[in-house]
Each structure stands twice: as structure tokens, then as C-alpha cells.
Image: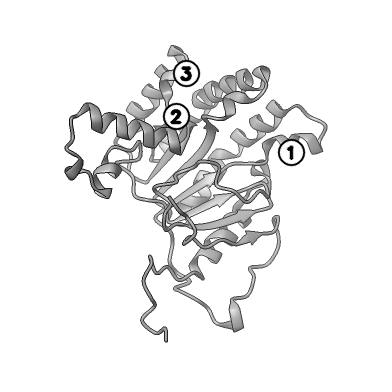
Amino acid sequence: MSITSASTITLPATQHPLPAAANGVHIGDPSETPHHVAVIMDGNGRWAAQRGLRPTDGHRAGTENIRAAIEAFAERGVRCLTLFAFSTENWKRPRPEVRGLMRILSSTIDREVQPLHEAGVKLRYIGRLDALDARLRRKIDEAITLTQHNDRMTVCVAFNYGSRAELVDAVRRMVADGLDPDDVSERTLSDYLYTRELPDPDLIIRTGGDQRVSNFLLWQAAYAEYIFSDTYWPDFCEQDVDLALQTYAQRTRNFGGRPANAD
């Protein structure tokens, strides 16, 4: 699958002005807000290294920034936010770091679920959760159940998630259900993905300065806009949210077509 049709831009670290549109012309509707934003929360380890801290300290700082980021996106009208927290490839990291990440996820659920519930946030999780220990899976299930009727915003946490694994799982389920090959369409495949109840992302933001998609929402992001921010995730703040959303509003999304006013 190709994502070459998705637009990209690199944003500098916090506190830089919004770059001017080409020829001073404002492209698109500046009031437009993406319905679904997905974030690759990157840069925790480098944030920690700059401060002489351990990688787990950076991950902890990153989780402590999640609630503020959720609130910032919600206040600006984003209805769905997906956060890439742990990939299927992250198991390759040193064992102490992986254990630390699991402990951090568990403590983050304990600390954040009730405040998010009171704020009207509905929680979802996507990924291969069967690889997690039973206690952690139970906490995740309880968080989903507690918040299932909230409707201010849906926050989807991608944990032990990989897009290729998701596609393999979707194909396996279709085969297990005995689907006829002639009955398989793009719509059918989408209905078998982890994200089947979510809209496709309009905007994907990667923090931390790297410019790659890292096996994240490959199918769903076919026509997403991409923004790469130099800000490390623990420092990603309201200014970064505003800069990303303003930049998105300058884009013209054609979904493979041609603008009506194009030559």
C-alpha cells in the first residue's frame, strides 16, 4: 500500500510561527478541524538522554503529558484521537525498558482513567492485547467498559500495535469466516481491522523529529495528511497542537481528484 498521496510538512520545535502559505495565499478552510487525529508519540528516549535520565524516565514523562494533550485536542474540536504508545516491534528493546513500559502503562491506567471518564472521554485500545499479562488486560477491559458511553471524544490507544500484524489478523479472520474471494472489497477489509468502528485519520502527527510512519495505520492513512514535529513528545504542548491544526487547515485534500479551480 502506498501513502505517497499523503502530504507532509516538518514543523520546528515549539514556539515558532506558522509558516506562510505559498505566495501568501491561504489554502483550504482555516476553520476546518480534522475529525480524527493520530499521533506517533516519539522522542521520549532522546528527551531523557538530553537530561541524563533513563529511557523509562522519558516514557514516564511522555505518559504524564497525555492528559494535557487529549484536553488540548478536545478543546479544539477533534472528536477522535489515536495515540501510538507501543508497537509490535518495540519488544526488541532492552528487557528492562520493556518491563518499565508495561509498568508505566499499568500505572497510567490507574491514574488517568477516572479523570478522563469524568471529562467525557471514551477509551479504545487497538493491537494484539493477548500478548499482555492478564492483570493488564483486565485493567484495559475495565477502562473500556467504564468509559463506553462517553461521547465528548474517543481516545484510542494503540498498544502492541503494528499495521502489518493488523492486516494479517484481518485476513485470517476473513478466511476463518469463510468469505468468498469475490465478496472481499476495501469496505470488507476495513470492517475486519482493529479500527473498524473508527473513522480513517485525517491527520497524522509524528513528534520527535523523525520522518517515517513506522508501521502505523498503513491502510487507514491512505489519504491522511502528515505533519512531522521536531518537538519531543514530553514537551508537546498546546502551541504544538495549534501549529499542527493550523497547518492542516491550510491543506487542500483532493483524495486523488483534481480541485475544481485547477487548470
In terms of secondary structure, where does tag 1 sit? Answer: helix
Residue 196 in percent (x, y) is at: 30, 41
- Circle 2: is it few (<14), some (14-19), or many (20+) Cα within 10 Å? some
In terms of secondary structure, where does tag 2 sit? Answer: helix
User: Residue type at mark 2?
Assistant: Gln
Mark nearer the N terminus (2 vs 1): 1
Image position of 196 with respect to 256: above or below: above
Question: What is the residue that sits farthest to the front in this orientation?
Answer: 181
Mark nearer the N terminus (3 vs 2): 2
Q: In which quarter of the image is residue 91?
A: top right
Circle 3 sits on which residue? 132
Circle 2 sits on which residue? 114
Asked if the residue at tag 2 contacts the one at tag 3, i.e. Cβ–Cβ closer than 8 Å, the answer is no
Report the disc number at residue 46.
1
Question: Does any portion of residue 252 appear in the rendered image?
Answer: yes
User: Residue type at mark 1?
Assistant: Arg
> Which quadrant does the C terminus fall into?
bottom left
* Residue name at image x 18 percent, y 30 percent: 178
* Residue name at image x 75 percent, y 34 percent: 48
Is residue 234 or residue 229 the one in the foreground? 229
Q: Quadrant of residue 165?
A: top left
Is residue 87 or residue 188 the one in the foreground? 188
In terms of secondary structure, where does tag 3 sit? Answer: loop
